[in-house]
Image (cartoon, rainbow, N blue to C red):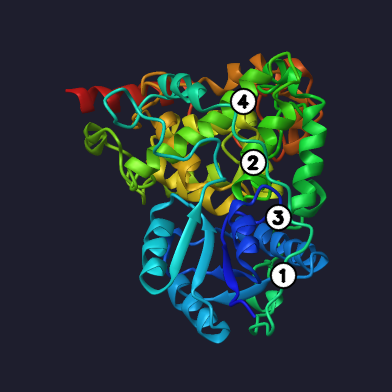
Amino acid sequence: MTAPSILWLRRDLRLADQAALVAACAAGPVVPVYVLDDETPQHRRMGGASRWWLHHSLDRLDAALQAKGSRLILRRGRSEQVLAAVAHELGAREVHALHHYEPWWRNAERAVAKVLALHLHHGNYLAPPGTVLTGSGTPYKIYTPFWRAMQQHLPPPAPLAAPDRIAAPEIWPVSDILNDWHLLPTKPDWARGFGPEWTPGEAGAQDRLADFADRAARYAARRNLPAIEGTSRLSPHLAFGEISPASVWHAVAGAGGSTGTFLGELGWRDYAQNVILSLPEYGAKNAKPEFDRITWRDDAEAKADLAAWQQGRTGYPIVDAGMRQLWTSGWMHNRVRMIVASFLIKHLLIDWRRGEEWFWDCLLDADYGQNAVNWQWSAGTGVDANMFVRIMAPLSQSEKFDAASYIRAWVPELAHLPDAEIHDPPLPVRGYPAKLIGHAEGRARALAAWADLKG
C-alpha cells in the first residue's frame, strides 16, 4: 500500500478549501495530525480563551473527519519532533500543510523541513503574504496603497470542495485524548459565557457566514454600532481557519450595498500578515523607534489602573462595557476595541504591550498579526498608525455610536439610567466606580508625554 502522507494542521481546521488536504488526498492515504506545540511559541503560546475554542474546534473536526472515513490524531510537543515520530511509526516521509506566517510557525516549518519532506500550500489569506509588493519589490507599509495593489490579485480563486472520502492508512498511530489536554477552564470556569455566544467548528463558521451574507450590504452603516449585530462575527472562525477568506469573499462579494467595505476588512487581515512577515517582532517592538523613549507609566505605579481597565471598572461606561463583554464572551465589538485601546494608551498612559498581552489571552479571535497591527495603530507606534495626539474621547464616542443599550447589556449598574445620562452618568451611582481620571486630565497627561518625546 502507498505510504501515507501526514496532514499537519494548525490554524486551518477545516475540510473545505483546504489545499493541503487536497494535495495529501491526491497522494494516497492521509493521517491528519494536530500538534499542541506550546514549546516553539514559548511566551506566545495560545491564550486561555483560544484554548477553549481550540478544544471544541478539534472535537468537531474529528467528527467531520470520521464522517469522511478518517480521524484526527492528537499529539503534544515540539512540532518537528512529534511529526518525525508519527512519520516513523507510519513509514511516512511526506507532510502537507498550509503556510503560516507567525514567526514561531515559520521557525517550526524550517525545523520540520529538515527532517521530513514538507510541502506547504497557500489558502489562509486572499493572496499569499509576500506577493503584493511595491513597484520596487518591497513590502507595503501603508494599508491603503497595499489594498489598491491587492486588487490585481482579486478575486481569490474559487474555493476547493471538501473531499468526499479521505483514504485511511492501514494502521493508525496512537492519539492523545482531547480531554487530557485540559484546554477548558474548570476552577473557576470563566468561559461559561462563551457557549451561548459561539459554535466553534467548520459548520458553525458556515452558519455564521450564511447569516452575515444576508446583512453584508448594510455593513458600512451598521458596523460601528455596538448595540446591534452589524459585524460578521466571523473573526474567531477565520483565526482558527475553520473557513477560508476565499470562501467568505465568494459568499458575499455579490451582495451589493456596502459589501466592499467589509471586503476591505478582509484585506486588512492580509495586510497584517504582510506586516509580521517583514517585521516578525511587531507584537513586542515599536515599529517607530522614537517611541522607545516615551515615558509610559511604571508598571507598579499603573498596576491598579491596569486591573481596573481589565475588569471594566474605569468609570467610563463604554470602556467598561467593552472590557466586560470581552471577559464574558471572549469577543469585543471592533469600534469598542479601538475605544478601549485608546483609553489604556492615552488616558492611562500604559504601554500598549500590556493591552496586547491581555487581548492575546482573552480574545477567542486572537491573531498575532492583527492583534499587533491594531494595537500599534492605536498607539501611534506602527508603520501605519493613528497619530498619538489623536485621542479618542470615550464619552462622545459612546453617544455618537448610540451605545446606550450596549452599555445596559454589559454594565447592569447603569441599566436604569436614561440615554441622556448613561454615556456619562452623574455620580454617585450605586455599585459603579468614579472615573479613574478625567478626560481633560488624561488627555493633557498624554500630550505632555508626547511633548517630552518630541523634545
- Does residue 64 lie above or below 449 as drawn? below
| Label 1 crowd (10 A; few <14 / some 14-19 / many >=20) | some
Q: Which residue is mark 3?
A: 15
Q: Which residue is mark 2?
A: 235
The amino acid type, in three-letter code, at marker 4 is Leu
The amino acid type, in three-letter code, at marker 2 is Ser
Q: CA distance from mark 2 to mark 4?
A: 13 Å
Q: Position of residue 405 (x, y in %)?
A: 78, 26
The label on residue 263 is 4
Frontmost of labels 2 and 3 is 3
- Residue at point 49% right, 75% down? 93
Question: Is residue 435 in sight in this rendering?
Answer: no
Q: Which residue is mark 1?
A: 167
User: In which quarter of the view is residue 322 placed?
Assistant: top right
Q: Is residue 382 left or right of residue 117?
A: left
Task: Give the mark nearest the N terminus, 1 or 2.
Answer: 1
Task: Give the mark nearest the N terminus, 2 or 4.
Answer: 2
**Element on which disc 3 rests:** loop
Q: Quadrant of the C terminus?
A: top left
| Label 4 crowd (10 A; few <14 / some 14-19 / many >=20) | some
Q: Position of residue 6 (x, y in %)?
A: 57, 70
Q: Position of residue 431 (x, y in %)?
A: 70, 40
Q: Is residue 91 left or right of residue 52?
A: left
Q: Position of residue 24 (x, y in %)?
A: 60, 62
The amino acid type, in three-letter code, at marker 3 is Leu
Task: Give the mark nearest the N terminus, 2 or 3.
Answer: 3
The label on residue 204 is none
